Amino acid sequence: SQELEQSPQSLIVQEGKNLTINCTSSKTLYGLYWYKQKYGEGLIFLMMLQKGGEEKSHEKITAKLDEKKQQSSLHITASQPSHAGIYLCGADFRDSNYQLIWGAGTKLIIKP
Amino acid sequence: DVKVTQSSRYLVKRTGEKVFLECVQDMDHENMFWYRQDPGLGLRLIYFSYDVKMKEKGDIPEGYSVSREKKERFSLILESASTNQTSMYLCASSLSTSGRREGDEQFFGPGTRLTVL
């Protein structure tokens, strides 16, 4: 969706290195969800952010929502092969009671 | 843990066939969703249901219909499968939409990769 842009589209990172994935919105985010998808499988919920400046961590993954609530970043510290997969962000714009708008995903490859 | 199951992981059908994709959730969730996922396009919502027998069109409902006769089960029907419906189909469920808070996140099934020849 053009309302929600994810970058980069794909990323190849040496094992042990840090990385950041961004999710940028054209309007205010009332909620931002991060999911991970292993190739060919369903999505696993990672974190949800709602408040400007909010930051949450799950193991070595940290996600933050900026103060203006229009961008979220997902940061992985000391990447491991288990981090490989597709990361998707889903946005709640409060336009609809039910729908999330999804980014196109970032494909992460970890080189050993 | 919430469990969302889908009837098949892989399915191969011929053009013109009627296709049924089944989704079952075991956590008494009110909302259920059907998405398709294609490379570079992310998730696109086909239909969702917020209660038994209730349904709403998503972004791409053409060529699809749905059925929700019981709370735990949400079926996606391709009335006459076409090659452009070859895709990964993902079902999801969520507790409610009364408030946007932790616990309202969508839980996904493992997906069905459908190929229409």
Image (tube, coloured by chain):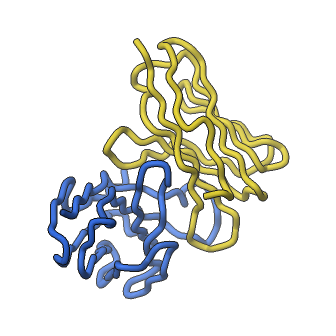
Chain colours: A yellow, B blue
- Image height of B4 relative to B67, above or below: above
Q: Residue shown at 58%/25% (left/top)?
A: A76
Please state the horizontal and vertical placement of residue B76, each as a whole percent of the image: 30, 74
Q: Report whether residue A56 is seen.
A: no
Q: Residue shown at 55%/32% (left/top)?
A: A58
- Image height of B40 relative to B27, above or below: above
> In the image, is A65 to the left or to the right of B97?
right
Q: How many marks?
A: 0
Q: Report whether residue B60 is seen.
A: yes
Classify residue B99 by image quadrant. bottom right
Please state the horizontal and vertical placement of residue B4, each as a whole percent of the image: 32, 58
Q: Residue furthest bottom?
A: B53
Q: Residue shown at 68%/58% (left/top)?
A: A3
> In the image, is B78 to the left or to the right of B61?
left
Classify residue B86 by image quadrant. bottom left
Q: Residue furthest right?
A: A68
Q: Residue shown at 44%/83% (left/top)?
A: B55
| Nearest to the observer: residue B54 or residue A85 | A85
Please state the horizontal and vertical placement of residue B89, each as a whole percent of the image: 33, 60
Q: Quadrant of the N terminus of chain A?
A: bottom right
Q: Quadrant of the C terminus of chain A?
A: top left
Please state the horizontal and vertical placement of residue A11, each as a whole percent of the image: 53, 28
